[in-house]
Amino acid sequence: MTAFFALATSLLWGLADFGGGVLTRRLPALTVVVVSQGIAAAVLGAIVVATGGWSEAGPRLWFACAAGLAGPVALICFYKALALGPMGVVSPLGTLSVAIPVGVGLFLGERPGPVQAMGIAVAVAGVILAGGPQMRGAPVQRRAIVLTLIAALGFGTVFVLIAEASTTVTGLFLAQFVQRVVSVGVGGAALYVSVRRGAPALPATGFPWPSLPALAFVGLADVAANGTYAVAARLGPVTVAAVLASLYPVVTALAARGFLSERLRTLQTAGAGLALLGTVLLATG
């Protein structure tokens, strides 16, 4: 069952990343984040009421609030990076977020073993190769690499904070609800400021209503992925759950190849593969 839920996490995260990246090519990243997370917050609110999740309220929710502040920054940067593409490079680099929980462990006194040390070296090499010299094939802008690394930092921070925000399934629903309410507030404020400065919140043709189901899917898939990962980590070894859940970039890359016909040059493919390998080594070390 651990493998089942962890692989479900990979599928959901991978499809959510692909959907978010595609939508950001049509809509501003802020709009995608606010709308998708707003839909997710509404659904989570209904679940919290139905399950009595409010009984789990306590000081731990401050961690969820902090996650809500870091989450929008990570999502906006990641969606912008995916829009710049190619997704087959950007998505694997985003998995470097696992380095944040490892760093927290080091701060608390843990020391990396040989496998983790190797994972750090392999991951750094992957970043360098993925953003290496421009030759032939799908180009990777330096901005996409920088945005992805910022997103990875934010995602890793959110993972640590959410882990501290809840200890039960109903508590997880409440923590995710609080996180997304804060995220919508922060994202909405940023969107307002952006519009006041002259940036459009919507295309010239208005809100693309046909994209609403896709926006809902992105938000709800992200929520579901967090839930399935939490279940997988509780049912079995966290290392097994983390390794299997970290395969989500494969889903994103396959979706980009199948739907967008992306083609990567050898150097980019090698860099993305090394980054993903480094993530697996970090998670299993």
Image (cartoon, helix red, strand yellow):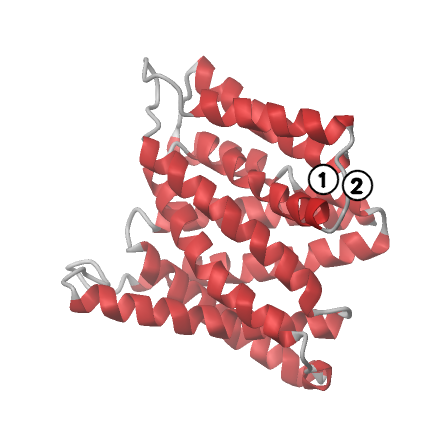
Q: Residue at x 20, y 66 (%)?
A: 195
Q: Quadrant of residue 203?
A: bottom left
Name the amino acid type tagged 1.
Leu
Name the amino acid type tagged 2.
Val
Note whether 99 is above or below 214 in the view shown: above
Question: In screen coordinates, is 148 left or right of 112?
Answer: left
Q: Secondary structure at mark 2?
A: helix
Per the image, the residue denoted by label 1 is 244
Q: Residue at x 33, y 31 (%)?
A: 142
Crowding at dot 2, Cα within 10 Å, few <14 / some 14-19 / many 20+, comes out as some
Q: Residue at x 32, y 72 (%)?
A: 189
Per the image, the residue denoted by label 2 is 240
Q: Are marks 2 and 1 in contact (CB under 8 Å)?
A: yes
Residue 139, image x, y percentages: 32, 24
| In the foreground, 137 or 193 | 193
Q: Secondary structure at mark 1?
A: helix
Residue 186, image x, y percentages: 40, 70
Q: Residue at x 39, y 28 (%)?
A: 261
Note whether 12 is above or below 219 in the view shown: above
